Image: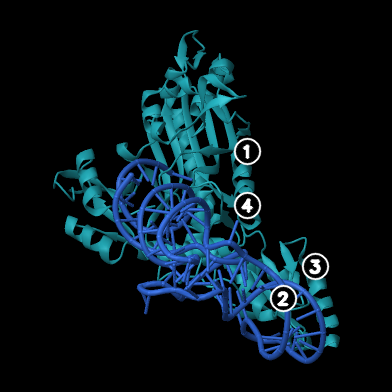
Chain colours: A cyan, B blue
RNA sequence: CGGGGCGUAGCGCAGCCUGGUAGCGCAUCUGCUUUGGGAGCAGAGGGUCGGUGGUUCGAAUCCACUCGCCCCGACCA
């Protein structure tokens, strides 16, 4: 009768699929590579949207919406961009029963159509900066898919901005990177490394790509957000120009940046355990579940009433629910809400009632504490914040413990096999060394930190001079 | 696209090797007893065995083809 979740140790990727399906976050769709996001998974995405959207708006961005379909020719205007995306495009060739004169691309990202519009809207330096964000779905025909982490269609936000100078675009790209980093830590309770991508890992059409990199429990890295300084590449391809104060015409400098439903997968992989998913309180769709426990009818009425009153009291302060179902046992409810990741459970049974208390149990570690019924409200908030903080601290310790130095190529290879995780190592900067290391170890350079990594050394592979170390890891 | 695995009741599976007319657990429904970590007993309903074709008196089982999905690799947020 117990739902069976494959233990993480036995098969991590089965575990991942099991918890998502069984917690009802998502389900496989009739279309290969696509997924149905069920209410629990979608509520998480909404929580992510809510928080990020507020931060984007605080920093001056506005939401807009651009069309799903993009004329095929638009993709060809930026050479690197089309080369990067060509293999994974979905193309619409027919509409209204007729073959289209020009095929339409289902957007894999919206740079091209957005810059085409920017070209219409931007005339003067007074029109800048343009700071736009859109929440949308995109399609990339991936060869191999995985729930939330990589699906053919996925939901994301894509920010697109245009600026008067390279410095301003660079500042924008880094501002967003910082928003992503703080969101990951403060809300998702997932500490990340930030840095710039190498040339080979960078977005097709970007000058520089920055990313936040998280570590999953199987010691594989996950790119959780990206921010690109696009330079003037798209501005030139789409003739996005503005007139300066002196009356000359210049191309704008632009950025684009995004996070996707992949973040939901990151949450699952970072915090889940063999009992199910486990969500940090700030993002959890349901933060507190109250489970009453009774034997007799007399107990039932008193305890159900106490549970209801408690929920009433907490309602304004947190997302709470009372589970009054009589057809399943308390034990069943404990397991079910743990499976679904609710961070805090309040139990109230005859013994609690007698002592005028609730028994609070943390999803994180099942630690129990007694909470007095009087002033419940005053206790629950701090408890949730404590859980949030403990989850982040646990994540920090995990990241720290799984980040090592690799002084030699041998050490890197051995470390990847034996422990996994991130490795700080020297790299000369050549794409050739990078590729060979990738081919030989399956590890890639996740990012080059922007600071704190200056140190003279020699490249792992060729012994050439290196002036800074980078993060290597196997990744999703 | 290469390698592996799987399609049998809503879900998870057995049966297939060695053909004989479909079974188990969970879920569902009814009744009674239960409820502090996935309750017990009794009864009931539910399946053209992924599809097509073939072999055979007879196919879930053997053969051929086909469709779909999952996992592992090459591409990617």
Point out the tag, 3 or 1, that comes first from the N-terminus: 1
Q: Nearer the viewer, residue A327 or A154?
A: A327
Residue under numbered circle 1: A57
Q: CA distance from mark 2 to mark 1?
A: 39 Å
Q: Nearer the viewer, residue A275 or B22?
A: B22
Residue in the picture at 50% in, 40% down = A258
Give how far apart the Cα atoms at labels 3 and 2 are: 15 Å
Q: Label 1, label 4: how many angstroms apart (C-alpha)?
A: 22 Å
Q: Are marks 3 and 2 on the same chain?
A: yes
- Nearer the N terminus, badge 1 or badge 4? 4
Q: Residue A14, how many percent across, how many down?
A: 45, 64
> For the residue labelled by badge 4, is the local secondary structure a helix, a strand or a loop?
helix
Same chain letter for marks 3 and 1: yes
Q: Which label lies toward us, 3 or 4?
A: 4
Ranked by sequence position, the earlier of labels 3 and 4 is 4
Image mark 2: chain: A
* Residue at the limit of the structure toward the left, as seen here: A463
Q: Are marks 1 and 4 in contact (CB under 8 Å)?
A: no
**Which residue is labeled 4 in the image?**
A42
Q: Point out the frontmost of discs 2 and 4.
A: 4
- Where is residue A105 shown, x and y percent of the image? 50, 28
Circle 1: element type: helix
Q: Which residue is mark 3?
A: A313
Q: Residues within 10 Å of mark 4 (few under 14, many from 20)?
A: some
Task: Label 3: state its secondary structure.
Answer: helix
Q: Which residue is mark 2?
A: A291
């Amino acid at each position: 009768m117990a739902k069976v979740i494959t233990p993480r140790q036995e098969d991590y990727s089965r575990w991942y699929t099991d918890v998502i399906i069984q917690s009802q976050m998502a389900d496989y769709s009739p279309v290969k590579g696509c997924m149905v996001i069920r209410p629990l998974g979608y509520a998480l995405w909404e929580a992510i949207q809510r928080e990020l959207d507020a931060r984007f708006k605080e920093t001056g961005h506005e939401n807009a919406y651009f069309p799903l379909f993009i004329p095929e020719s638009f993709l060809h205007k930026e050479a690197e961009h089309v080369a990067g995306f060509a293999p994974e495009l979905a193309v619409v060739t027919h509409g209204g029963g007729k073959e289209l004169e020009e095929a339409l691309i289902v957007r894999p990202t919206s740079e091209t159509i957005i810059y085409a519009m920017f070209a219409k809207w931007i005339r003067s330096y007074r029109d800048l900066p343009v700071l736009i964000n859109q929440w949308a779905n995109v399609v990339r025909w991936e060869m191999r898919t995985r729930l939330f982490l990589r699906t053919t269609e996925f939901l994301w936000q894509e920010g697109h901005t245009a600026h008067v100078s390279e410095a301003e675009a660079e500042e924008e790209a880094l501002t967003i990177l910082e928003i992503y980093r703080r969101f990951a830590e403060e809300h998702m309770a997932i500490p990340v490394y930030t840095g710039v991508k190498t040339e080979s890992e960078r977005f097709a059409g970007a000058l520089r790509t920055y990313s936040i990199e998280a570590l999953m429990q199987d010691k594989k890295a996950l790119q959780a957000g990206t921010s690109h300084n696009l330079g003037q590449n798209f501005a030139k391809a789409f003739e996005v120009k503005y007139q300066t104060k002196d009356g000359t015409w210049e191309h704008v400098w632009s950025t684009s940046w995004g996070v996707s439903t992949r973040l939901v997968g990151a949450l699952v992989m970072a915090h889940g355990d063999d009992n199910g998913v486990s969500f940090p309180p700030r993002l959890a769709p349901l933060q507190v579940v109250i489970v009453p426990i009774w034997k007799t009818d007399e107990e039932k009425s008193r305890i159900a009433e106490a549970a209801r009153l408690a929920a009433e009291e907490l309602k304004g302060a947190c997302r709470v629910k009372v589970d009054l179902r009589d057809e399943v046992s308390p034990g069943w409810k404990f397991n079910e809400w743990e499976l679904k990741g609710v961070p805090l459970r309040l139990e109230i049974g005859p013994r609690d009632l007698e002592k005028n208390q609730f028994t609070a149990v943390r999803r994180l570690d099942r630690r129990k504490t007694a909470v007095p019924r009087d002033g419940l409200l005053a206790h629950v908030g701090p408890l949730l914040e404590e859980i949030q903080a403990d989850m982040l601290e646990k994540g920090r310790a995990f990241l720290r413990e799984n980040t090592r130095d690799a002084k030699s190529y041998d050490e890197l290879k051995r470390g990847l096999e034996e422990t996994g995780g991130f490795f700080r190592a020297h790299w000369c900067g050549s794409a050739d060394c990078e590729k060979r290391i990738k081919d030989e170890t399956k590890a890639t350079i996740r990012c080059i930190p922007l600071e704190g990594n200056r140190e003279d050394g020699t490249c792992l592979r060729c012994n050439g001079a290196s002036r800074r170390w980078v993060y290597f890891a196997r990744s999703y």
